[in-house]
Image (spheres, helix red, strand yellow):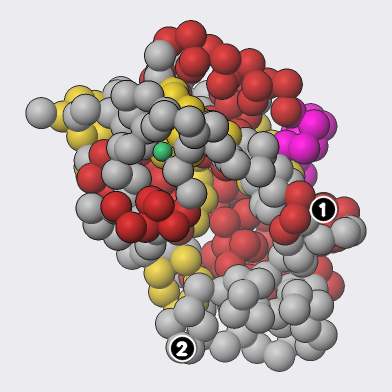
Amino acid sequence: MSRNFESPGRRPAACCGRFAPSPTGRLHFGSLVAAVGSYLDARASGGNWLLRIEDIDRERTAPGAAEAIQSTLAGLAFEWDGEVLYQSRRLDAYRAALSQLRENGDIYPCACSRREIAARAPAVGVDGAPVYPGTCRSGLPHGRDARSWRMLAPAEEIVFDDRVQGPQRQDVAAAVGDFVLLRADGRFAYQLAVVVDDAAQGVNSVVRGADLLDSTPRQIWLAQRLRLPVPAYAHLPLASNAAGEKLSKQTRARAIDATSGSPLLAAALEFLGHVVPPDLRHAPLSEFWRWAIANWSITFVPARRSATSGSPPAAVAADADEDP
Ligand SMILES: [Zn+2]
């Protein structure tokens, strides 16, 4: 049996979108694609577009990266609404959500180490990590202390309609098992933070990279249990390099240079399936955005999880690798 949590397959009429980069380094072409897609989708509906810095994982946060991301976006004439939200300043909200789940009986303490989980896992999950075997679900083993807190996976499949990737379904229990919300190191999990923040910011339309498609059912389940609205979802193809690797800090993707302007934005929009008129490539940014907002259609975006970004012209990519 499956249940559809009323995740609308269409963008809401009064749309509120967002871009939520992790400040692990400078923006690269892959993250620019998510910024362009979420921005145009929100603006084309006359909606708001918010900026959130997902710096909850302090160890991965690079000094100065949050500022560099904002300055790159501003240099490309992105305009965000309201104040920038920093996850590192939202710990009270995450704590409150965790308490609510605890009162609901949705979470439980877990004593298992990574090694213990790996030894008993029934399978490798969608994230590439072992599926949690449920060891502590009915109580901590005798004499053991809690290391983390886990969310009970839903008993039913989660079904939703992705605006780009189409109908999706996942049995979270089989795909990941009961999942961690409060980690052994005392930090809140991304899954919890993103759900709490989207609701707090009034985000009702999430447009982001397809690397998060597999964690969306967990987020829908969390929103449901926290009695929060479930946003519409659209997962854009990920830009990959010639070797088929996702552009990221790990694959040494080159940082983008805001001075590349319209040609760079045109490359991102073409990656998202739009045909950009040649003269627009060298138009002022304001003209580029005017055309792009008027001509954006999410139906042009390829329903694929990843695509090769090709080799952007030398003028488009910055030479310096500032994202080691
Ligand atoms: Zn456990």
Q: Is mark 2 within 8 Å of ligand 1?
A: no
Q: Disc 1 or 2, which lies upstream in sequence?
A: 1
Q: Is mark 1 within 8 Å of ligand 1?
A: no
Picture quarter with ligand 1: top left
Q: Residue at x 76, y 50 (%)?
A: 58
- Above or below: residue 116 compared with residue 265: above
Q: Main secondary structure of the magenta part?
A: loop
**Image quadrant in which you'd find residue 231:** top left
Residue 80 in sight from this viewpoint: yes
The N terminus lies in which quarter of the figure? Answer: top left
Left or right of residue 89: residue 109: left
Q: Position of residue 214 (x, y in %)?
A: 37, 50
- Residue 258 vs residue 202, the one in the foreground: 202
Q: What's the residue type where badge 1 is placed? A: Ala
Q: Secondary structure at mark 1?
A: helix
- Residue 90 vs residue 303, the one in the foreground: 90
For disc 1, the marked residue is 66
Q: Position of residue 190 (x, y in %)?
A: 57, 42
Magenta-drawn segment:
75-90
For disc 2, the marked residue is 243
Residue 107 included in the magenta stretch of the image: no
The C terminus lies in which quarter of the figure? Answer: bottom right
Q: Residue at x 64, y 25 (%)?
A: 94
Left or right of residue 231: residue 260: right
Pointers 1 and 2 in contact (C-beta within 8 Å): no
Judged from this view, the residue extending furthest toward the top is 103
Q: Position of residue 320 (x, y in %)?
A: 82, 85
